[in-house]
Image (cartoon, rainbow, N blue to C red):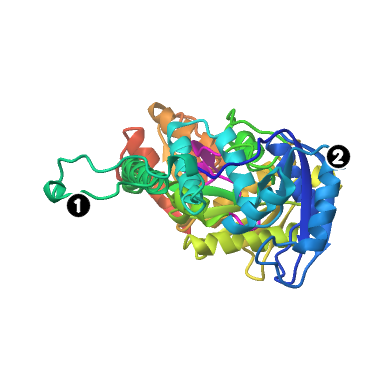
Amino acid sequence: MFFERPQAGGRALLVHVEHNDGHSGTVGELQELALSAGLEPVGCVTARRRHPDPKTWIGSGKMDEVQCSSESLDAELVLFDQELTPTQERNLEKTLKRRVLGRTGLILHIFAQRARTHEGKLQVELAQLEHASTRLVRGWTHLDRQRGASGRGQGAAIGVGGAGETQLEVDQRMIRTRIRQINQRLARVRNQRSQNRRARMRADVKTISLAGYTNAGKSTLFNRLCDADVHEADQLFATLDPTLRRLEIPVTGKVVLTDTVGFIRDLPHTLIDAFRATLEEVRQADLVLHVVDASSPDHLDHVSEVNRVLAEIDAQEIPQLLVYNKIDLVDKAARVDRDETGKPVRVWASATRGDGIDALLEAIGERLSTDVIETTLCLRPHQGQLRARLFALGAVMDEQIGPDGTMTLRLRIEERELHRLARHAGEDLNAFGYDYADQ
């Protein structure tokens, strides 16, 4: 499908270029991307450019340095921390005699390794094909004409059957066909997710989505909150496939927690478009838990980058609760920061050690609760099932048991949740009444 390219290997030379657009990454992040792709970084060449060279990005002078370094270090692959145009990529490979990958190609390579579910594999393949469609060139000279006229088509009788298709045209047609097939399958996935969300809305179940920069600890926090077994690792894009679990929140009750793909600086648009079905869970959430790596020196830039991606998927208006994770690495105490109205806006926690997790659950409950009431409920001895559910929810502030076994519960709970629990237990609150103390 592609032009003739040098064979790739595992030894990678990193090329990091700082430029004036204000979005330059760091050498450390490029190295982490390489390690996450299973490559061995053997060296790094840094440069500073005011404007990228249209032919090679780095210019002829720096090209000589990259070539010398790649030869002396026996590098089989050259990784750039920028998105390269097809022309730049081809010119670099022609000069360096080595495989060259830009930032998008490297991230797509990582995603292809990590996808596990059928949906995830489809989304990655779609992104790869859309990326590849811009890199098809007239490289297959030995197959300049794959087939000619059949002699049976329109115009064949007078010898104007046509010259046939070039290999480039065949490749383009095959890619378009496959993209159309994948989009049709993902449309069915999107419809299924939409139906599931409508079912949760009918059941009045609220949804929380985890979002954040890659390797901020989202999956570790997800496992801690839901007692799940989602794969977690100290590497970029450790998990790609979306996971949904039920979570019990004080006062609010049952909610659905969603773990999604991590974001990164200059996340390729092809990936955003391909993963739109997955990211739709974030856009439809009632609350976004924005997980931040408190130990990263670039955490403020990471917050800005995540907010930029959320804006791209029209999720910037969803209420956010910042979760500063990994406080065990910076010797910070677990706490909850509130705004001038007393609303929790930041929670400092450690998903690894469990510090601040209870405070996080309470903060989530505060942010999700809309009709919290304090009320007194009197239950008879045979209504123990409802009593057990109220205690499990953490809604009981005080309980007194009378001589006849009557249980008087002082509750702080959402009114809708109280009625839902009563219906689930087969009880009618109006049959024995309850008293509103504060609303």
Secondary element at image label 1: loop
Residue 250 position by quadrant: top right
Residue 72's spot in the image, x, y percent? 88, 41
* Side of 11 where 345 appears, left or right: left
Q: Is residue 295 visible in this depiction of the protein?
A: no
* Side of 40 where 54 appears, left or right: left
- List the residue tagged with mark 2: 73
Residue 179 position by quadrant: top left
Residue 235's spot in the image, x, y percent? 71, 39
Q: Amino acid at mark 1?
A: Val
Q: Which residues are magenta?
A: 240-267
Indicate whether 422 appears above or below 369.
Answer: above
Q: Is residue 249 magenta?
A: yes
| In front of the other: 110 or 319 | 110
Direction front: furthest residue: 158
**What residue is at 39 percent from the left and 39 percent from the top?**
421
Alpha-carbon span between mark 2 and mark 1: 57 Å
* Side of 265 where 316 appears, left or right: left
- List the residue tagged with mark 1: 160
Residue 259's spot in the image, x, y percent? 54, 42
**What residue is at 57 percent from the left and 40 percent from the top?**
111
| In front of the other: 57 or 198 | 57
Q: Is residue 110 magenta?
A: no
Q: Is residue 391 visible in this depiction of the protein?
A: yes
Q: Amino acid at mark 2?
A: Leu
Q: Nearer the viewer, mark 2 or mark 1?
A: 1
Q: Are marks 2 and 1 in contact (CB under 8 Å)?
A: no
Secondary element at image label 2: loop
Indicate whether 189 appears above or below 94.
Answer: above
| In front of the other: 299 or 285 | 299
